[in-house]
Image (cartoon, rainbow, N blue to C red):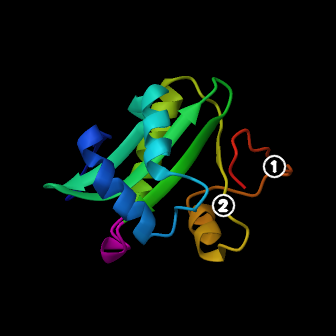
Amino acid sequence: MPFTIRPFAERDTAAVIALWEARGLTRPWNDPAADIAAKLRVQPELFLVAEEGDAILGSVMAGTDGHRGWLYYLASAASRAGEGIGRALVAEAEARLVELGCPKVQLMVRSENAEVIGYYRALGYADSDVVVLGKRLDAAP
């Protein structure tokens, strides 16, 4: 593997945000810097980056409540597509969740994002017979 996976460090912030923006993960109502700051307060060891030299090639945030694990912000550099960066990040996040005794992991993908849904299906993820409900607790729309 020509890249390494390690926990996120604050020096990675600008590169990770640029990666998320380039890959279409950011939304106007989510401040990525605030999302990073929040993650660094809770299970920061589950926020991972893939790097080669000084370049950030990918990221994934994971977390668990002790029953379910979640994956967020999986991204890899478009210029390195097909090299297994995203797959390696998912595998490492899953392994760390298993080490914490987490029996299940899940994620959410926007329903219109068919390409990403197919990607996760290829990694062994399947539709769950659930309805995801959400409620904003901040002032965002």
Q: Residue at x 65, y 36 (%)?
A: 104
Measured from the top left, where is residue 113 in percent x and y?
65, 72
Quadrant including the C terminus: bottom right
78 displayed left or right of 121? left
Along the viewing direction, whichever of 74 and 3 lies nearer the viewer: 74
Q: State the extent of the magenta-drawn residues as a range.
A: 77-85
Residue 85 showing in the rendered view: no
- For label 2, the crowd category at 10 Å Cα-Cα, with few meaning under 14, some 14 to 19 and many 20 or more, is few
Q: Are discs 1 and 2 less than 8 Å apart at CB?
A: no
Quadrant including the N terminus: bottom left
The residue that disc 2 covers is 109
Measured from the top left, where is residue 122 in percent x and y?
58, 65
Along the viewing direction, whichever of 121 and 140 lies nearer the viewer: 140
Query: What amino acid is found at the position of numbered circle 2 in the picture?
Result: Val
The residue that disc 1 covers is 132
Along the viewing direction, whichever of 113 and 88 lies nearer the viewer: 113
Q: Residue at x 34, y 68 (%)?
A: 77
Residue 121 counted in the magenta span: no
The numbered disc on residue 68 is: none
Residue 110 showing in the rendered view: yes
Query: What amino acid is found at the position of numbered circle 1 in the picture?
Result: Val
Measured from the top left, where is residue 89 in percent x and y?
40, 50
Give the mark, 1 or 2, whose residue is nearer the N terminus.
2
| SS class, disc 2 | loop
Q: Quadrant of residue 23?
A: bottom left
| SS class, disc 1 | loop
